[in-house]
Amino acid sequence: MKRLRELFAPVDMTAGAPWKKILVFMIPMLIGNIAQQMYNAADSVVVGKYLGDNALAAVGNAGPIINLLIVLFVGIGMGASIVVSQYLGKRDREALSFAIGNCIILTAISVGIVMVLAILFTRPLLDVLNTPESIKEWCESFLLIMLLGSVGLAYYNILSGVLRGLGDSMSALVYLLVACGLNIGLDILFVAKFQMGVNGAAWATILAQGISAVLCFYKLLHMKNFFELKKSHVCWKKKYVTEIVEMGVPSGLTQVIMSMSMLAVQSLTNSFGETVIAANVIVARVDGFATMPALSFGTAMTTYAGQNVGAGFHKRVKDGAVQGSILAAGISVGITALLLMFGRSFMGIFTNTKELVELSYRFMCMLSIGYIAFSVIQVLCGVMRGAGNPMATMWISVAATFLIRLPLAYFMVWLTKSSQYPVGRPESLYVSQLLAWLFGMVLTMVLYKREKY
């Protein structure tokens, strides 16, 4: 029983070998992030197998719009994680309690905003993206259900961010695994059994996310060794709201930039027709799993840097950055090898169409080469966020997206137009992403070297 309590106890990142602390904290979060990806993957597998490739394209086409409209959740969640980790490092119990209480208030406000935006902008965004008429209605209904039911998504993302800031990645993992299993079961029940179409996949997701949010809140109520969440703490305090927003806005803006980039690329993808759209969905799902270790290291480094900066251990921050980068890059090498060897099998999970499997595999091979660069970006950006400089990571995203990714994608598509490819070669979408990652890695290393810890 004691061993079980230790497993679920928050991790103190200010003592012990940095790489061990980072790895111990990261592994449960990695499993949790993989489980989070299984939400989308389960929807895609069930929809693709039971409803066909067009339905798969509709669900995937909704992804960039969902990512754009939930940027508030991303920003608040990251801001909460940074602020909470720094107050934990300072051992300031009262400030920690008020910070968490204000996270709850900000989440409620953000949910209301997203619901209004969903009603106003879902259909216009689909029109702007040149969404094919054959999938537009499915796409719209899926989006409205997901966004109008986003309360579970919001509270899980933000409360799990609070748990990570406290050094507890294990609890969020367990709760997410429970919800993931529920989501898969409900997907099969609603889509295959009740024949609810793509709407069934959306209902399954929002119900499962609601469960995970409730479990996170329950855990926080029972962490009285570190803080107390009384009614008096759940009240608007400008000091804490300002801190959360200042730390979270750059992350939210980064998400906006990435989402706008995805929308622009999605519009370009849509011009290639349903087959390329469906292939892009499959690649995105596999890529979501492949990038999870790097993203998990990035989030772990945010907590690691936050706790150590709060405690004043600046040299330890730099040691952790080096060790974390080596770990993340090594894992990315292994992932790239797996994708190159077994990529076709992974693609075949989502569709029975051989042409689609081959097209997806070709795209995936191009993208996988850049995973090492992506892992370095995530680790060093995580350190800069945790140290209190999230603006640097925002500018890296701006530069990589608007100076490299988008101009190159559109230019290469135009350059490769021919009688065989009247719209251009779709491979251009992935070559531009690869080059953006390489540029981003160099820029991240330069900005990181300029930081003073």
Image: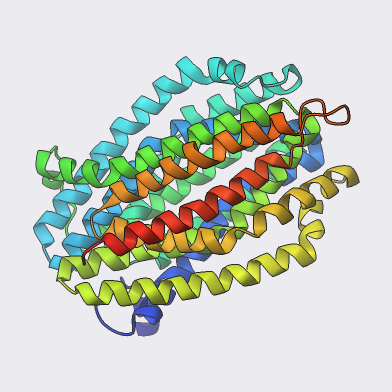
Which corner quadrant of the image does residue 82 belong to?
bottom left
Where does residue 378 sit, x and y in percent of width and height?
Answer: 44, 59
Closer to the camera in the image, 229 or 372: 372
Which corner quadrant of the image does residue 301 belong to?
bottom left
Residue at x-position 53% and y-position 41%: 404
Closer to the camera in the image, 140 or 446: 446
Closer to the camera in the image, 233 or 359: 359
Where does residue 236 sit, x and y in percent of width and height?
Answer: 14, 37
Residue at x-position 73% and y-position 42%: 427
Name the quarter where the N terminus is drawn: bottom left
Where does residue 75 sit, x and y in percent of width and height?
Answer: 34, 42
Residue at x-position 76% and y-position 20%: 134
Name the quarter where the C terminus is drawn: bottom left
Is 51 left or right of 153, judged from the image as shown?
right
Is 273 left or right of 265, judged from the image as shown?
right
Is 49 left or right of 117, judged from the image as shown?
right
Where does residue 367 sit, x and y in percent of width and height?
Answer: 66, 53
Residue at x-position 33% and y-position 57%: 447
